[in-house]
Amino acid sequence: MKCRSAVVYEHGGSVVVEDLNLASPKDGEVLIRMGASGICQSDWSVVKGTIRYDLPIVLGHEGAGIVEAVGQGVTYVKPGDHAILSFVTYCGLCRMCQSGRVVLCEGVLANNGHLLDNTCRFTNRSGQPIPQMARIGTMSNYAVVSENSLIKISSDYSLQKAALVGCGVTTGIGAVTNTAQVQSGESVAVIGVGGVGLNVIQGARIAGAERIFAIDLVQKKLDYAQQFGATDSINASYTQPREIMAELTDGKGVDYAFEVIGQPETIHLAYQVTRPGGMTVVIGIAETSADIQIPAQDLVRSEKRLVGSFYGSANLRLDMQRILDWYDQGKIKLSELITQTYSLDQVNQAFDDLNAGKNIRGMILYD
Ligand code: ZN
Ligand code: ZN
């Protein structure tokens, strides 16, 4: 069949929106009609080449859609089911999957966005096979994905809200509830309060954190942060956040500091504002070559813990449903995260707006 997809042919160039051929789902695969795809910083990182794929590749890793058809042997979903697409495809069988740490699956090896049998379902006009970012490629009105890339959900949720849960919401909330396991009454700092950082704030609120400090360079984002539950905001464009944090915490620092930017300087700042015995959680994805320096003696004497958090350390099918339950109970906001919608053909405009910091989340909607 024909489909319309956003494809990266050249690092740093414009994204090409074109008609591709899409083959039928094979064993264990599912044809999805996409409803919505978020525009995330990580998509731009693929365009730039800081998240590395061999090109060309179909973009997009945050989406939700409706099952149109299933291949042989698919048992988890049937046509008509609604599903969130996961940017991690997991085997369900390895030691990590069995212990619930599916985002660290050891059974599915990286293969540049090819499906699990190492082939592609998309081809372009010249017959060139095109793999999919994160094996899903949500910036396409149709995609064929493994059933192990899907989280089935009720059709009560709009697909744009569901798409948000596919990346930013789960990454942010999971970092608090799974990775850090923040407890009621504790204090949290969030460095970088964009689409993911706001969800760290939502997670901290659910956990009952008493004080939630938002730190960013952009005042508009700090204003959003307060709407999402931050108790204090610090604009680092004209203040020294380290000193202010010391002042506001009686020189002690916070129990948990989350870094949501992916830069060595801000990771270092997060470590500095963490109190002795506290935890620094790094969520932001830095460039492949970036290193961080941490004072080695202080690490020991302060017993600070420095940990990474990928995809909210989520046990995806359980945790995404839990997040939707929290939404049903009015504990978290979802629609407020979407500040602009686009058609697929406007994808380059959407990236311009992303880079200008215009949106919390831009969202591509399909007919
Ligand atoms: Zn993302
Ligand atoms: Zn596994």
Image (tube, helix red, strand yellow):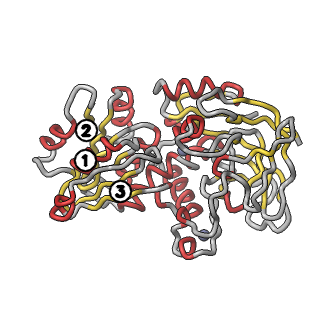
Q: Is ligand 1 closer than 8 angstroms to the Cβ of mark 2?
A: no
Q: Quadrant of the N terminus?
A: top right
Are the residues at dot 1 and dot 2 in contact (C-beta closer than 8 Å)?
Answer: yes
Q: Amino acid at mark 3?
A: Ala
- Residue at image location 78% in from the left, 31% down from the top: 18
Q: Is residue 272 above or below residue 195?
A: below
Secondary element at image label 2: strand
Q: Is ligand 1 closer than 8 angstroms to the Cβ of mark 1?
A: no
Q: Is residue 103 above or below residue 17?
A: below
Q: Is residue 117 above or below residue 120?
A: below
Secondary element at image label 1: strand
Where's residue 340, x and y in %? 57, 27
- Residue at image location 63% in from the left, 75% down from the top: 93
Which residue has dot 2 on it? 232
Which residue has dot 1 on it? 211
Crowding near pointer 1: few (<14 within 10 Å), some, many (20+)?
many
Q: Amino acid at mark 1?
A: Arg
